[in-house]
Image (tube, rainbow, N blue to C red):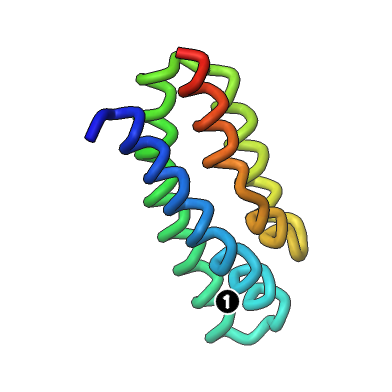
Amino acid sequence: MTLDDFLIKYSRFIDNVDMYLGPVSSLSKQVGEPLFDSISAVTKTLDIGVKVPFVCIYVARTKDFSSIPYFTLKETFAATVPYGGFIEIFRTYEKITRKNIKIR
């Protein structure tokens, strides 16, 4: 498996997980109960723990430094705006990865 293949599979994994964790995190945050706040915090921590290594590997491979502000703004929006996690249902990580890997 090449690094490009790995990045595409990793981005697909992120998008597949985000489709569920993003909305669950947003809804859990909106309920306002301590248990659901904890669920939201755990999902966001796991989310960041998976995405930061991906972005580091992706940028090192593609030299696409312009993606850092994009990914940062998207994740900040998803984490801070009420119901912002629903933006995670779009397959942005795989789309951007495939676009920039094809260029190389």
Please give the name of the residue rendered at 70% of the width and 83% of the height, measured from the top-left corner.
31
Asked if 39 appears above or below 77 in the picture, the reply is below
Nearer the observer, 63 or 91: 91
Q: Position of residue 80 (x, y in %)?
A: 69, 55
Total label count? 1
Please give the name of the residue rendered at 61% of the width and 48% of the height, measured from the top-left corner.
91
Residue type, numbered disc 1: Asp
Name the residue tied to disc 1. Answer: 37
Q: Position of residue 57 (x, y in %)?
A: 35, 29
The image quadrant of residue 56 is top left
Q: Position of residue 15 (x, y in %)?
A: 53, 53
The kind of secondary structure element at disc 1 is helix
Q: Position of residue 86 (x, y in %)?
A: 71, 61
User: Taking 87 as reference, is 19 left or right?
Assistant: left
Nearer the observer, 45 or 6: 6
Placement of the C terminus among the 4 image quadrants: top left
